[in-house]
Image (cartoon, rainbow, N blue to C red):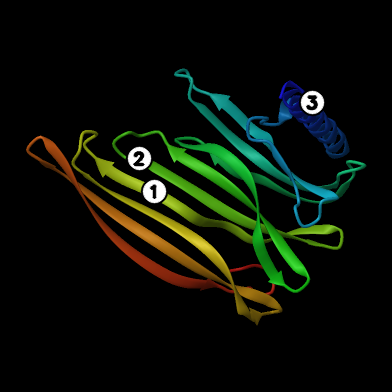
Amino acid sequence: MKKYLFALVLCFQISFSQNDDQLNTVLSQLKLKESQVNMELFTQKVLPYDKDKSVLVIPKYQVNEQDNEGHSYFVLDAYIVVINNTTGKIICKSVEPGAWTSDAFVLSGISIDTGLYILNKTTRAFGIRVDYNGSSKPNPFGETNLSLYITDKNSLKQVLKNYTVSNYSGEWDTNCAGEFQESNSAFDMDKVQTHNFNNIIVKTKIVKTVNTPVKDDCVSKETIKKETSKLIFNGKEYK
């Protein structure tokens, strides 16, 4: 058991070391310093369908400020990079200045989504999910936006931009009485194509909740609605 734990810890250490080396190599190619990057939001992932490559999301500060009360405000340039895992060399990249802002709606997380976004027989996309959370207790808010990217020869193209796949909002008295709404969307690839890319079927579940104080209790009533829509590729992006 001890040998197993030691081997596991060693594997993690090697993995972290390799990731650090890859990041330093990539930053050098981009002519960036680690101090320019929001390392809490930095993320990387090996592509499961192309294990010789990894995606790195490098959030570079454009603005980084803090008010007298300690609240942070920052604007980030989005560096989305695909690299060769052996050499660390950049294969393709996308740079979007001022892509993400964190203010009253706090940018709380960035993740790489390698779901089955198969757009045609030869093209598979990967996703970047960006999470936001509000800071108001009486008016809670949360949102996740999804962007999709494809590699095309030596270029990286964004084919879906900031589509809201999850949303939560509400208004209440912070005790019981109030109304809330939560929606979550899932993507299915359609067999029908437009401009050689599969249409995307979006299935959304919307849950509305009303809380009402009754004597010493708080009674919740839920209403569930399901919707279906489509995203169509117009030759440049999905709309």
Sequence-earlier tag: 2 or 1: 2
Q: Residue furthest right?
A: 87
| Front one among 18 and 22 | 18
Q: Is residue 32 left or right of residue 229?
A: right
Q: Is residue 234 above or below residue 162?
A: below
Residue type at mark 3 is Leu
Q: Disc 2, disc 3: CB below 8 Å?
A: no
Q: Residue at x 32, y 33 (%)?
A: 137
Sequence-earlier tag: 2 or 3: 3
> Which label lies toward us, 2 or 3?
3
Q: Is residue 234 visible?
A: no
Q: Which residue is mark 2?
A: 140
Q: Residue at x 49, y 42 (%)?
A: 132
| Front one among 216 and 33 | 216
Q: Position of residue 50 (x, y in %)?
A: 81, 55
Q: Which residue is mark 3?
A: 10
Q: Residue at x 47, y 67 (%)?
A: 203
Which mark identifies residue 104?
A: none
> Which label lies toward us, 1 or 3?
3
Give the SS element for disc 3: helix
Q: Residue furthest top?
A: 68
| Front one among 1 and 35 | 1
Residue type at mark 1 is Tyr
Give the SS element for disc 2: loop
Q: Is residue 181 left or right of residue 147?
A: left
Q: Which residue is mark 1?
A: 168
Q: Residues within 10 Å of mark 2 (few under 14, many from 20)?
A: some
Q: Disc 2, disc 1: CB below 8 Å?
A: yes
Q: Position of residue 134 (x, y in %)?
A: 42, 38
Q: Quadrant of the N terminus?
A: top right
Between marks 2 and 3, how big is the CA–CA gap?
42 Å
Q: Position of residue 194 (x, y in %)?
A: 65, 80
